[in-house]
Amino acid sequence: MHESGSAVPAGGTGGSPARPRLEDVAARVGLSTASVSLVLRGVPGPSERTRQRVLKAAAELGYRPDRTASALASRRSRLLGVMVDVHSPFHAELVEHLHTAAEEVGYDLVLSALTRTRDENTAVETLLAFRCEALILLGPVAPAATLAELDRKAPVVSVGRRIAGAPLDVVRTADDDGVGQTVDHLVGLGHRAIAYVDGGKGVIATDRRGGYRDAMRRHGLHEHVHVLRGGSTEETGEQTGRRLLDDGPLPTAVVAYNDQSAIGLLTVFRSAGVEVPGTVSVAGYDDDTLSRLSCFNLTTVSQNAREQARQAVTTAVERLDGGRTEPRETVLAPTLIVRGTTTRAR
Amino acid sequence: MHESGSAVPAGGTGGSPARPRLEDVAARVGLSTASVSLVLRGVPGPSERTRQRVLKAAAELGYRPDRTASALASRRSRLLGVMVDVHSPFHAELVEHLHTAAEEVGYDLVLSALTRTRDENTAVETLLAFRCEALILLGPVAPAATLAELDRKAPVVSVGRRIAGAPLDVVRTADDDGVGQTVDHLVGLGHRAIAYVDGGKGVIATDRRGGYRDAMRRHGLHEHVHVLRGGSTEETGEQTGRRLLDDGPLPTAVVAYNDQSAIGLLTVFRSAGVEVPGTVSVAGYDDDTLSRLSCFNLTTVSQNAREQARQAVTTAVERLDGGRTEPRETVLAPTLIVRGTTTRAR
DNA sequence: CACGCTTCTTAAATCGCTTTAAGAACTGCT
DNA sequence: AGCAGTTCTTAAAGCGATTTAAGAAGCGTG
């Protein structure tokens, strides 16, 4: 059963025509597999004539290198593992840009989805089993120590989440700055009673809350600082909205932890007859697909997915091919996107 | 000849501890790699004693088989390729269930994202390069002939899209039935003037439109059949909504091609002071995340992602391991989800 | 104790590609 | 011619697993 280069296209059970191998291409042009491999990978050496012939033959046979084999042989998979929450529209956008960025530097992506029944550990294990050379984790929640541990197996880039106390690569936007810009914008419109709806206990929530506090202080609105308990979903937004309506005089503007929360507020306000932005201005964070819907048209902050993705890939590749070993944190500036839910104070 | 696995754990240039290989496990228990491989894959043969020792050693070393190598050696990748539109929330849900379904039958998933700059061809090529054994395409738009061609390289399962005229595996829900159920529901509420907002020229749009027509006819509402030009986005929904408002008497109910379109209608109606469902009932299709937002609370049709995912995996695996060769179309019944945008006719 | 039978183990060949050291084919120069 | 220098090519050794045919134990029997 070792009729290696036999004439029969394929045997076995299936009917498929047996994918051509490097050897088939080599045989066709009467060269060695070594030469063919060299040509196909663009390694200098082969003569122009050889190059042309090989390229032609490969094209004619419809040859596609076998990733598994070349990964094994070269001990390089040229794969970047990406852990992503399939349900997050923001992650979707990141993935989109990661793809193009990776392609430009000759890497491919392996996506590992986070689901209700698939935790970060599983997702990462899968990535490792694929021999990904570096891991790009979108909004990881694992403790810093775990990530540091992981980083010893393969370079880790945390996107969107600041990692304190561990020497890891991080790419993120300045969350405090984003909220700060929003506050600036509102103050510029004459608002003073600007409330903030908090997002919980995560690192991100902390940063955004801090950004709000600082900005208010900066504008001398210290005594107007008002942080309300909230969350990251429409539901919590609605709850907070109702509390606001019940608890006496409304602020003239409310900044929410994220778009979903903001939309919850919006819904409650409008159905209670409170006009937005007529009576209350509302701003969110994330530039979620939701926020762009014309029925919301929410003023929000964009995290610049494109640039973050690009930086994440660069960061990973630098450690892989560039020999960088010092961890680096890349902090990008977010962009305020003014839409229709904020206007001059009443 | 087998002094390959020397005593030193790693050494060499790098600093990483060098992932343990099968050979390392074998050396540790003084057995051959063959035995270890057998044990680790659960193949009967090795004695109980051997089994225990191997398992222990593997655990101690933290051994994880190298997918790349085993795929190459076994000529089986046990990988299912999934083409997915990262931006679609419905696809996200499918992916989630595909993961669990695949895991149950011992397969892993490779996701290949469709983006603005990454077409179906590219996505599928990637999947093939990973040596996926079968391809699960979520809502493919490629012509039937292309898919049939592809199917010769690896079994293809089209999810959500009916493929006419090509012998391919398909898993989908009955779109006509879904719209039919919606119409039934509305008729049951006393509606007679039920309009339909079309979704364009695709197969799915055609089916849904047909479902509307048939259902209306079935209820003897032949002369109330009213199909409006529309689309699949909020924008087109809004446009159609405005046309409806302009063009004289409103129907008492409008069924839209999908949720996004329905939400466009909703937005226009409400901002024009037309109450939904007070004056007009509105229904969508897809049970999109959007539709669940309390501010929309849209009556819609669920495509039962979980079951579709499960069937898709089963279908693929049957062809891979079960030897099935006849193509099969699995049509699941969609489920009407009544929420707050439909009520008794005025 | 030699025999046939199981039951375990393992040597060795692959899988399809990469990589490196060595070989072949030319060149130009003395 | 002879020799060094270039420029191309290739043989052959892996990569880390799987797989199979053959070998080694173990074990009742006659």
Image (cartoon, coloured by chain):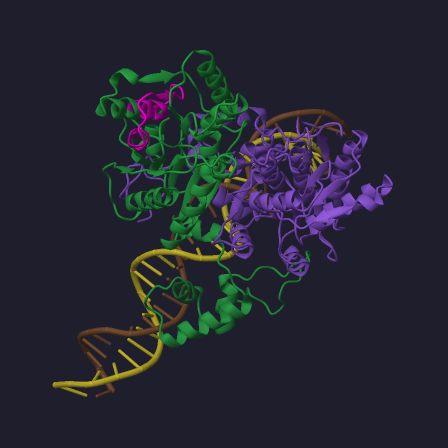
Chain colours: A purple, B green, C brown, D yellow
Residue range of the region highlighted in magenta in the rendering:
B183-210
Would you say A245 lies left or right of C9 here?
A: right
Magenta stretch holds residue B337? no
Magenta stretch holds residue B192? yes
Would you say B323 lies left or right of A157 here?
A: left
Would you say B324 lies left or right of B154 here?
A: left
Specify whether residue A332 is in view.
no
Give the residue at x 58% y 35%: A93
Specify whether residue B212 is in view.
yes
Would you say C28 lies left or right of B290 here?
A: right
Quarter containing the C terminus of chain A: top right
Residue A301 x, y percent position in the rendering: 69, 35
Residue A238 x, y percent position in the rendering: 58, 43
Which residue ends up furthest to the top in the rendered image?
A: B247
Give the residue at x 74% y 40%: A179
Residue C27 x, y percent position in the rendering: 66, 25
